[in-house]
Amino acid sequence: MAEPILNQPHFQDADKAREYLEALRWPNGVVCPHCGSIGEHYKLQGKAHRPGVYKCTDCASQFTVTVGTVFERSKIALNVWLQAVHLMCASKKGISAKQLERMLGVTYKTAWFMSHRIREAMTAESGGLLGGGGSTVEVDETYWGNTHQSKIGKLVGTKQGGHQKEKIVSLVERGGKVRSIHVEMVTAATLKEAIAKNVDKNTHIHTDSHYGYRKATQGYASHETVNHTIQEYARGNVTTNTIEGYFSILKRGLVGTFHHVGEQHLQRYVHEFDFRYNTRSALGYSDTDRANLALKGIAGKRLTYQRTCSQRAV
C-alpha cells in the first residue's frame, strides 16, 4: 500500500523541507542569489546561525535557499509551504484559501497570501509560440464575474451577452498546452494581439464565428470556424471542443471552489489553471512532478502583501 503523500519527511519537518528544496533548486551546486555564482560556498553552522545559511565565496553575502523567492522572509515553516504547493498542484479545480486555512492551521489572511504567492510561482516566464508545423490551435473567449459590480460592468451598464463581465481569451494547441489572457474587451484588436503574441504563423486556427477572428487570423496557415448559433460544434476536424473542455474546468473551479474572484486577481487564477492543464497527466506529469515544477518557479518572484492586494496581476 502506498504511503500517503503528505506523510513524507519534507512535508513534516522544516529541515527536511529545506534539504528537499535545496536539492531541487541547486542540482549542480549551491547558487548565490546575490551574484549568481555556483561553487563551494561556506555553510555557516553553530549557535549563531540558523540551519541552511550559506556565505558566498565571491561576494561574501549570506543567503538561504529561500532568498529571492516567493518564500523569502516568510514566518511560515517551509514544510507547511511545501504542503500548500502540493495541495494546489494536486487539486484539479483548485483549492480555496479557506480550505488551506483549515488544513494547514494558519489564518485565512495567511492562507490567501500563500496561495497568491504560489500562483506567482506557477506563472510561466515564456514558452515560445504555440502551434507551428501545420498543427492546430483553437482560440475562444469566455466570460466570468458579476453583472454590475466590476469595473467593466459599471462602464457598460446592464447590457446582456457578457459585455458587463470579465473576459478571458484562451488559446490551446491540440494535444498540447494552453495560454489564457484576461482582457478588458473582446475586439478584433485584442484577439489579434493575443494570437500574434502566442501562435506561430504556420498554424491552422479554429475558432467560433465571432467577427473579430476574421482579421485576427489573417496570415496564418488557415482559419476555420464553427457556428454555434446554428448548433454546429464540429465539422469534420474543425471544432473548438478542446478549448471548451478547458473552459469547463476553469469555470468549475471559479464557480465551485473560489466562488468570487476579483478582477484585479483574475489573471493569477487563470495562470494557475493554465499551469495545471499544461502539466496534466496526459502529458506525462504526476502530482509530484507538477509540485516540483512549481517549486522550481519560485525564484525571482518575491511578492509583498501590499502588492498582492493592490496591483493587478499581469
Image: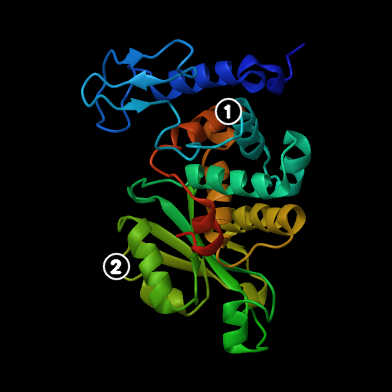
Under mark 1, the amino acid is Leu
Foreground: disc 1 or disc 2: 1
Can residue 43 be seen here? yes
Q: Nearer the viewer, residue 181 or 48?
A: 48
Q: Residues within 10 Å of mark 2 (few under 14, many from 20)?
A: few
Under mark 2, the amino acid is Gly
Q: Residue visible at 66% across and 16% down? A: 8
Q: Residue visible at 56% across and 70% down? A: 167
Can residue 236 be seen here? no
Q: Which mark is residue 108?
A: none
Determine the secondary structure under disc 2: loop
Q: Which residue is mark 1?
A: 78
Q: Which residue is mark 2?
A: 219
x and y, in percent, of residue 154 in the image: 61, 85
Question: Going by the image, does 103 lie left or right of 122?
Answer: right
x and y, in percent, of residue 4 in the image: 74, 19
Whichever of labels 1 and 2 marks the residue nearer the N terminus, that label is: 1
Q: Residue visible at 52% across and 28% down? A: 292
x and y, in percent, of residue 23 in the image: 44, 18
Q: Residue visible at 37% across and 45% down? A: 127
Q: CA distance from mark 1 to mark 2?
A: 50 Å
x and y, in percent, of residue 275 in the image: 53, 44
Residue 58, by quadrant, is top left
